[in-house]
Image: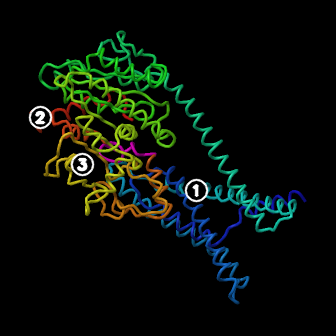
Amino acid sequence: MWFGSAVTRTMRVLRIDAPGLAIGTVFYIWSLTPSLLPRLWTFQGLIGGIAAATGYAVGSLLAFAIGRLVLSRVAWWPPPARVRRVLRIGVPILCAVASTVALYYGVRSQAQLADLMGTDPPSYLGYLRAMALSLVIAVAIVAVFRVLRDVGRWLARTINRIFRIPRRVAGVISLIVMLVVTYTLIDGVALRGSYVAMNAVFSATNDTTRDGAVQPALAEKSGSPQSAARWETLGFEGRNFVSGGIRAAELAKYNGKPAKEPIRVYAGLESADGPDAQMKLVVDELERTGAFDRQTLVIIPTTGTGWVNPTAAQTFELVANGDCALVAAQYSYLPSWVSFLADREKAAEAGRRLVTAVHDRWLTKPPGHRPKLFVYGESLGTQAGEGAFDDLNAIRSTVDGVLWVGPPDSNPLWRALVDRRDPGTPEAEPTYANGLVVRFANDAAAIGRNPDPWLAPRVLYIQHPSDPVVWWSPELLYQKPDWLSEPAAGDRSPAMRWYPIVTFWQVSADLGNAAGVPDGHGHNYGTVILDGWIAVTQPAGWTDADTARVRSALLDLRGHDGPEK
């Protein structure tokens, strides 16, 4: 008897609702369409399952509403039992055939997108695995929600029986209780517990050192024997940063003239007791190394764990021929994607502290003997950098130029500038105030495309049309963005379309492969940072031949200064 009852409950949980299945199939087919980047079969399986389950819920709710409001009032509903049997058999078959055909065209569109990006195309076998994974995920999600629904109904009956209140009121109370409990479990237990667990895991990683990273002997580097920022306290990324760099002899070889030893200053989370002490250590290190006597001083608010793009750091040193200082500080143990979800305010505050501390000490130097002060940021580092400034006027009154690469859509300053762009200019590559102070570019050619005057200090954002970090936003769930209403620019596939809910999950999946594509695509900006840096800093006497020489050096040095992110 118990067994029969359990089987009945299981069948009720797993039964198929024809309208839900039909709409779920439509959502699944949408998920197979191209987005910003080529998708691995695992990502396709994940978003296909989520999309199908979401569509199933939408279809079931629509069928329920139409049945209650419309069909319950017509004489011919419900249809005869024979028709219902045909639908129960025919709809799943049609959905399976439609999904298989869509899968074939989905693989073709992914192959075209992979060709555009210069990556390997997916295989049909891989996407058959994706279909199976999507089915498992969709069934699991629907089953969980049906169990929650049944628990809610049981709770409503219990409330009705014990407190003798109307069924509808009991149903509302039950719904509120279920929502509160579910939210508490997800936000208070799952998310916060995951955050604590990940912080513990990544703090352990922070204590490790990359193979090949050795303590610097040069006084110009934090972590050296002469430094108050001890080597063992700098963290994994900090040790990568200070152990790298281009020596003066190498710079002289690449640039054909005598060079200085570049300065790299860094403070880890464990280098000082608290944020204020960490910032004091940073400026003391700048004083110790003679950073305020150099030609340029570059402030680099970091991403997540304190990562600094090795290509960017090498670019600054090559262009300045070593007459520069780079300064960065760690503010978290967590990688960028976790910090983006959980630590965005912390990132902005860390950037504000770093820029303010360095700028305040910089102001104490004689005006004629200060280095030029620049800010560089990439990915979440742009959000940290923006946190130091209220608006463009604050930037222009504080530093001599800013280069920000791959800014997230949630950056408040970037978002405000894009929203207020000049009429008729696209969101993917906007123009603001005719490019007088701030400009946007999606590649090296676009940086110099605007012939109008560009006042110093200059602000430049570089953003790929295919970078999901730039274009991901919760609004994708319910609103078509301007950049998807515009003709496809640069390396964005013209076949990409916006679909409610589904496009959000597609771009979310793209985030997982954002840096896994070749230079010039996605979140991999390669040596276009050089072109941006030249445009912002305007080094005296610089020529196209100098740019070509430095680019060649960067390609030669690739991998010699720590791993790419």
Q: Disc 2 designates what residue?
A: 542
Q: Disc 1 designates what residue?
A: 132
Residue 140 — which label? none
Left or right of 185 on screen, residue 7: right
Q: Secondary structure at mark 3?
A: strand
Residue at 30% x, 14% y is: 288
Q: Is residue 400 magenta?
A: no
In terms of depth relative to the viewer, which is nearer, 213 or 327?
327
Q: Quadrant of residue 376?
A: top left
In terms of depth relative to the viewer, which is nearer, 95 or 432?
432
Q: Position of residue 529 (x, y in %)?
A: 26, 39
* Disc 3 residue type (three-letter): Arg
Residues marked 1 and 2 touching at CB (< 8 Å): no
Magenta residues? 512-524
Q: Secondary structure at mark 2?
A: loop
Give how far apart the Cα atoms at labels 3 and 1 are. 46 Å
Q: Is residue 521 magenta?
A: yes
Circle 1 Cα neighbour tier, 10 Å, few/some/many (<14 / 14–19 / ≥20)? some
Residue at 64% x, 56% y is: 141
Question: Quick check: 203 above or below 111?
Answer: above
Q: Disc 3 designates what residue?
A: 439
Give how far apart the Cα atoms at labels 1 and 2 are. 57 Å
* Disc 1 residue type (three-letter): Ala
Left or right of 125 on screen, residue 354: left
Circle 3 Cα neighbour tier, 10 Å, few/some/many (<14 / 14–19 / ≥20)? many
